[in-house]
Image: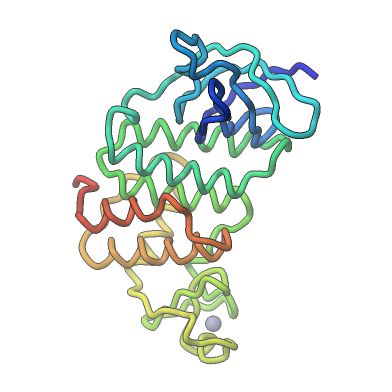
Amino acid sequence: MLYQTEGIVLSSSDLGEHDRVINLLTEQKGLVRAVVRGARKPRSRLAAVTQPFTRADFQLYGKGSALDRVIQVSLIDSHPQIVSDYAKVVYASYLAEIASELVPEHEKNAAVYHLFTDILVALGHAKELWTVCRWGELRLLGSAGFMPLLESCARCGRDPGGAVYFSAPAGGVLCDNCRVAETDPASAMKVMPGSVKTLSVIAASSTRPNVVARGQVREEAAKIMREYVAFTLGKRPKSLALVEKLEGEGASRN
Ligand SMILES: [Zn+2]
């Protein structure tokens, strides 16, 4: 079956001698894995569109099993502001990996497609990459039904007050009483109210949030998200190591 959809290349890998396989987030069919025949031959017209973060109109052919095949592509945006900037590539790759873990294959989810498009535009224009990364993490998780509860205790619904804990298994913050009652109280980490407040403000923003976090709040909010993302996906994203390296170096420019 021949079909047409807008899509964004999340990642790509070599196949055989001449081909590439792309992992596509599409508007019409969710996640699609497709072969681009001859993409690695010299002067291939399709080589450019196998680059990660390329947004294009794709014509594909698929039989519903195995890999689909790219027939024709018309480029919409190659996101030059991202691909020319190492830190932006690192963040975009990490958020693309989260999307590819969360979005089911061949199931239409136009909302998550438009969200990811917005995330790439925000990364392209952002100075504060840390904030866009937290926003991307939270909104992608939210789009799959995993938005963490950050304003009130995930168990009793009360304001946790000054003693706030974050528990990935509980899906958000816990008050001290509920933490003690958990089967594994040690899995909840004590956090500063400012860290969850910062994440909460970022999560509530429907467009790129105008938030700058510094110092301990910045470190702790990132740590909360690392833990929660790994718990929700059931594994640590491979691309997280490079994000941690950037954030550890303080390279996400202020
Ligand atoms: Zn509680």
Colour mapping used in the image: rainbow
- In the foreground, 176 or 167: 167
Q: Position of residue 98 (x, y in %)?
A: 52, 48
Question: Quick check: 7 left or right of 206?
Answer: right
Spot occupied by residue 10 in the image (x, y as percentages of width and height): 51, 35
Q: Residue at x 70, y 30 (%)?
A: 67
How many numbered circles does the render carry? 0
Residue at (45% x, 30% y) in the render = 52
Q: Quadrant of residue 178?
A: bottom right
The residue located at (71%, 34%) in the rendering is: 108
Give the quadrant of the N terminus. Answer: top right
Q: Is residue 116 above or below residue 222?
A: above
Residue drawn at x 31%, y 31% is 125
Q: Residue furthest front?
A: 17
Above/below status of 217 relative to 79: below
Of the four image quadrants, the one with ligand 1 is: bottom right
Relative to 190, is 18 on the left or the right? right
Coordinates of residue 113 in the picture (x, y in percent): 58, 34
**Residue 147 in the image: above or below residue 16:** below
